Image: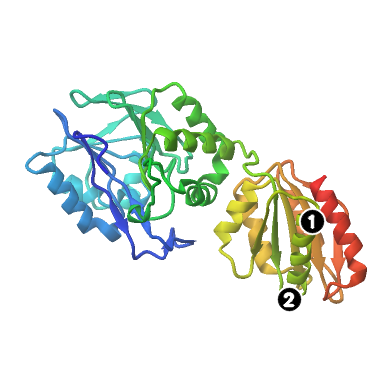
């Protein structure tokens, strides 16, 4: 896991965590990455979550041996990366904290009892810090995905320390590789991570990608997930460009449904059948009452066309669909086509609410017809469902 003899990995895997940020299921755990640069002056790059602080502290001290860090580089103040700042500062009282001005303002929020005054080295875009044979160049990355975020580029070994950028869900011990050494499936959990963690901030990610394009990067070292090099690095940058521009990654249709008693589900499965029969290259399906919400958000961004089917509820919209659309709204969802199917036994209302919520999203189109079924799909509903399938594919 070390990048080189002088750039060491001291991060940890968390295999016991069930929910990352108390909301995202992580069945394969999570990694908290941290690094040390051993040079004339030693720099520690970020700490880890309090859940794994004992293991991280041991990794740090084993790597340092008798040396003392001159600097702690704080790329991101979120607690899963910054929980050990006060401990490290107390353990090494001559160490300086290198961070953005916005991060410096946040320090008292998280560490109200720690007196770090006089130990802060505030850096901004383009500033550099020499450690000896290694030099860190700082890159401002505000709102990727917090306002204080810095990235840093180590000029000698050409490493981009990317904060939460280019991260993914999953512990490193679960990473699989092909015989040639490339990662077996980086994109799947990286995509779910990106759209749920950073998805709102596409413009800000694009700004960082433009800065990165002017650098000769051989390695990307994120705060979560595997270190990226070679083909993996190139593919990650390609996907980040697609994702942050809100472009379509995969041609196909995403069918998402929220059914109470099974009637809406039956219509959704029929729609899947119709789409496949009409030559749709890929049809992804999610049951919003049971499937992982973050997976559904991922697929909504991955595909350019969505078919939403939902039951009416309390003169409105069945909550699992309402929650899904709310998540799309707050993630800055845009530039997609929707087809809608509502279900209602006496006063269908789901279509109206879905239409209103989609109407608040940028450059999103709703194709006609909006189909209404009454409790259960009937033979008489099939022509409208078929017309809707044709419309979303046109």
Which secondary structure, mark 2?
loop
Residue 209 visible in the snapshot? yes
Q: Quadrant of the C terminus?
A: top right
Q: Residue at x 51, y 50 (%)?
A: 188
Most foreground residue, 105 or 380:
380
Most foreground residue, 384 or 164:
384
Q: Position of residue 334 (x, y in %)?
A: 68, 43
Which secondary structure, mark 1?
helix
Whether residue 376 is situated above or below residue 359 in the rendered picture: below
Residue 370 visible in the snapshot? no
Q: Which residue is mark 1?
A: 277
Q: Residues within 10 Å of mark 1 (few under 14, many from 20)?
A: few
Q: Position of residue 84 (x, y in %)?
A: 25, 51
Q: Which residue is mark 2?
A: 262
The residue at the far left in this view is: 66
Q: Quadrant of the N terminus?
A: top left
Confirm or deny contact between disc 1 and disc 2 (CB under 8 A): no
Q: Residue at x 46, y 36 (%)?
A: 142
Viewer-nearest of discs 1 and 2? 1
């Amino acid at each position: 896991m070390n990048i080189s003899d002088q750039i060491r990995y001291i991060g940890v895997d968390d295999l016991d965590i069930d929910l990352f940020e108390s909301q995202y299921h992580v069945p394969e755990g999570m990694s908290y990455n941290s690094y040390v640069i051993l040079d004339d002056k030693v720099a520690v790059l970020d700490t880890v979550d309090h859940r794994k602080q004992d293991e991280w502290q041991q990794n740090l001290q084993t790597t340092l041996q008798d040396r003392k860090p001159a600097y702690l580089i704080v790329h991101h103040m979120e607690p899963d990366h910054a929980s050990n700042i006060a401990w490290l500062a107390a353990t090494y009282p001559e160490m300086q904290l290198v961070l953005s001005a916005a991060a410096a303002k946040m320090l008292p929020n998280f560490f109200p009892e720690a007196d770090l005054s006089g130990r802060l080295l505030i850096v901004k875009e383009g500033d550099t810090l020499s450690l000896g044979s290694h030099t860190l160049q700082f890159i401002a990355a505000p709102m990727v995905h917090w306002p204080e975020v810095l990235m840093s580029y180590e000029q000698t070994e050409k490493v981009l320390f990317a904060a939460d950028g280019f991260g993914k869900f999953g512990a490193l011990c679960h990473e699989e590789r092909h015989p040639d050494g490339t990662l077996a499936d980086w994109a799947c959990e990286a995509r779910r991570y990106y759209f749920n963690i950073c998805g709102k901030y596409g413009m800000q990610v694009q700004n960082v990608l433009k800065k990165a394009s002017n650098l000769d990067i051989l390695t990307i070292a994120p705060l979560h997930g595997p270190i990226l090099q070679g083909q993996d690095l190139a593919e990650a940058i390609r996907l980040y460009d697609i994702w942050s521009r809100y472009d379509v990654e995969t041609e196909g249709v995403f069918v998402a449904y929220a059914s109470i008693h099974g009637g809406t589900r039956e219509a959704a499965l029929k729609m899947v059948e119709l789409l496949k029969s009409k030559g749709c290259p890929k049809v992804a399906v999610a049951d919003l009452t049971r499937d992982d919400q973050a997976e559904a958000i991922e697929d909504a961004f991955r595909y350019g066309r969505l078919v939403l089917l939902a039951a009416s509820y309390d003169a409105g919209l069945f909550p699992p669909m309402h929650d899904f659309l709310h998540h799309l709204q707050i993630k800055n969802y845009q530039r997609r086509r929707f087809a809608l199917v509502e279900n209602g036994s006496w006063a269908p209302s789901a279509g109206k609410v879905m239409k209103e919520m989609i109407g608040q999203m940028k450059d999103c189109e709703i194709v006609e017809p909006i189909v209404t079924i009454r409790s259960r799909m009937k033979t008489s509903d099939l022509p409208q469902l078929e017309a809707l399938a044709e419309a979303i594919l046109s």
